[in-house]
Amino acid sequence: MKNIVLTGFMGTGKTTVGQILAEKLKRKFLDTDQIIEEKLGTSIKEFFKKAGETKFREIEAKTIALISNIEDAVISCGGGVTVNPVNIENLKKNGIIINLFASPEHIFKRLCKDNTRPLIKQMDNPLEGIKKLLSKRQKAYENCDFTVNTDNLTSEQVVENILENKLIKDILK
């Protein structure tokens, strides 16, 4: 059975929504960031400091290539996964890719006190930085199968929106 893959910018709810969705569908839940942290033995924040984003993206792509072969899972991907077209190709081989979207203002509210986000912490003006990064990644997010706007929705409501989508209904038959 095909995977359900959640992508989107940081702070859009991928991990929480993914956990709820996996539990509801009785599927295994995989979080790429968690898998990478376990593999590295350190946090992504610390790895970013030591090795930089380029090295992180290489490890992320290898992780995506491996987990794309798993079946019947809900997979939550890090916010930058869609920037690499090879990641999208790998994930689409065995999955439906859902982009969770939120406005820059909602993302900022959700992340302003989160110290674990290396890209946010590097920004002089986080709200403007979020807007620029979202704009830069917009084309990559359009490569997903469909989008759910998470603004003003609870995680449970986002899950219900996902389950109502025809693509998801078709793979769950």
Image (spheres, grey):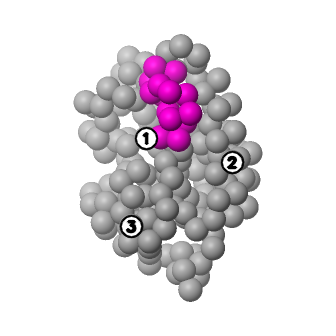
- Who's the residue at 65% across and 23% down the image? 55
Residue bounds of the magenta highlight:
34-47
Residue 35 sits inside the magenta stretch: yes
Number of other residues with Cα within 10 Å of mark 2, as a class: few under 14, some 14 to 19, many 20 or more: few
Residue furthest to the bottom: 173
Q: Label 3: state its secondary structure.
A: helix
- Who's the residue at 65% across and 59% down the image? 70
Q: Which residue is mark 1?
A: 10
Q: Which residue is mark 3?
A: 23
What is the CA distance from the residue labelled 2 to the residue labelled 3? 22 Å
Q: Position of residue 110 (x, y in %)?
A: 29, 41
Q: Tell me which numbered mark, 2 or 1, is placed earlier along the sequence.
A: 1
Q: Tell me which numbered mark, 2 or 3, is placed earlier along the sequence.
A: 3
Residue type highlighted by circle 2: Leu
Residue type highlighted by circle 1: Met
Q: Label 2: state its secondary structure.
A: helix
Q: Which residue is mark 2?
A: 66
Number of other residues with Cα within 10 Å of mark 3, as a class: few under 14, some 14 to 19, many 20 or more: few
Residue furthest to the top: 50
Q: Position of residue 98 (x, y in %)?
A: 53, 60
Residue mark closest to the camera, 3 vs 1: 3
Q: Quadrant of residue 118?
A: top left
Q: Quadrant of residue 145?
A: bottom right
Q: Label 1: state its secondary structure.
A: loop
Residue type highlighted by circle 3: Glu
- Who's the residue at 31% across and 35% down the image? 111
